[in-house]
Amino acid sequence: MSIMKNIRNKTFSPIYLLYGKESFLINDVKQKLMANVLTNGSEEFNYSAYDLEEVPVELAIEDAETYPFLGEKKLVIVHNPVFLTAVKQKEKVEHDLKRLEKYVSDPAQYTVMVFIADYEKLDERKKITKLLKKQAEILEAKPLNEPQLKNWIRERAAFHHAEIEEPAVDTLVFMTGNDLMALNEELIKLSLNAGEKGLITEEMVKRLVSRSLEQNVFALTESVVKRESGEALRIYFDLMKQNEEPIKILSLIAGQFRLIYQVKELTGRGYSHKHAAGLLKVHPYRVKLAAGQARSFSNEELKAIIDLIAECDLKLKSGGLDRSVAVELLLMKIMQEK
């Protein structure tokens, strides 16, 4: 990301516009600016932040136009510039946008002013938005697509002084999703456990990464597919101890077996894993795993299992049987389905 490279090289823009819903990316740039702009203990004198839902933008501009004290540059952070959006709301504060336009056109070179707009979209029709986009260095913090996300994971692992294997990248995305904050926390943990070689392997990811309910249910389904009744029931009883709802677990099991059936159908027709993932709108790694699980069943067996799940769902909703016991019996029936 060129904006980060410039900050590390201490080549600062007088104005930054950071906008979008991916808060981790915005906060990362903000922290790098604080670490690089404010030097020699000048944070107390040369850093300030303003919430434009509480104060007028003129206060931030006056601050930005004041010379730094005991440092070369000031850092002024401006939050919630709602006037950049099309959102209509009763504003508690009136902002002098003419004065802001004047400042943006000719900013103080001894100040780094950062507008943080955690909005999905800005109103491109507004004069101030157009002017900021023309004058400022911009970060559009939108969710990363799959190739960008994988590249970000590799770069973040390197930032934490580690290297990550490609299968480990796939597994980490599958287990954690695209939440950058959660991914970064897991990468910190993995890099600390990478040892002298500094290599993060797939086995490490499976062993160390925190499992969500969905991941635990996937592990449960994997044990069911392999007919490992002891392991399947151990996972299920652990989920019960964690007060997870049986009906929610059943819903996730149903989703997994539906995916196995759909993948079996599509791959049987010659679809690649990537094409099947696109059609089913799921991560390709999930399709790869489901295809492996599908080999343990015929189409008829999968249909029978889906019927068993539907029967169990009806029992849970009708209240005819204890919910926990009903799902436990279902798991045993599925493992006997042959």
Image: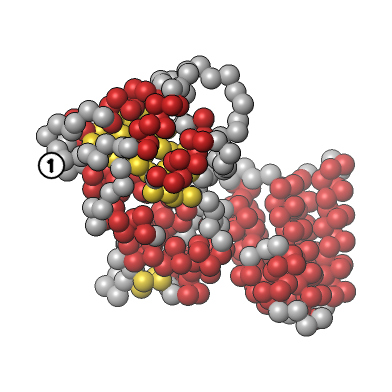
Q: Is residue 333 left or right of residue 223?
A: right
- Residue at x-position 37% and y-position 23%: 58
Residue 210 picture location, percent across and down: 49, 56
- Check the image and report above or below for 33 versus 76: below
Q: Is residue 21 left or right of residue 67?
A: right
Residue 60 picture location, percent across and down: 34, 27
Name the image quarter holding the N terminus.
Answer: bottom left
Find residue 279 and report its image quarter.
bottom right
- Residue at x-position 85% and y-position 75%: 299
Find residue 330 and report its image quarter.
bottom right
Q: Nearer the viewer, residue 155 or 255?
A: 155
Q: Is residue 326 left or right of residue 3?
A: right
**Mark 1 = which residue?**
40
Q: What amino acid is at disc 1? A: Asn
Query: Is residue 227 at least partly visible in the picture?
Result: no
- Check the image and report above or below for 244 versus 162: above
The type of colouring in the image is secondary structure
Residue 320 picture location, percent across and down: 86, 43
Residue 102 picture location, percent across and down: 38, 31
Q: Nearer the viewer, residue 287 or 100?
A: 100
Q: Residue furthest top?
A: 92
- Check the image and report above or below for 286 versus 47: below
- Residue at x-position 41% and y-position 53%: 185
Q: Nearer the viewer, residue 98 or 291?
A: 98
Graded by Cα atoms within 10 Å as few (under 14), some (14 to 19) or many (20 or more), the crowding at tag 1 reads: few
Q: Nearer the viewer, residue 310 or 133?
A: 133
- Check the image and report above or below for 131 versus 59: below
Name the image quarter holding the C terminus.
Answer: bottom right
SS at circle 1: loop
- Residue at x-position 19% and y-position 31%: 67
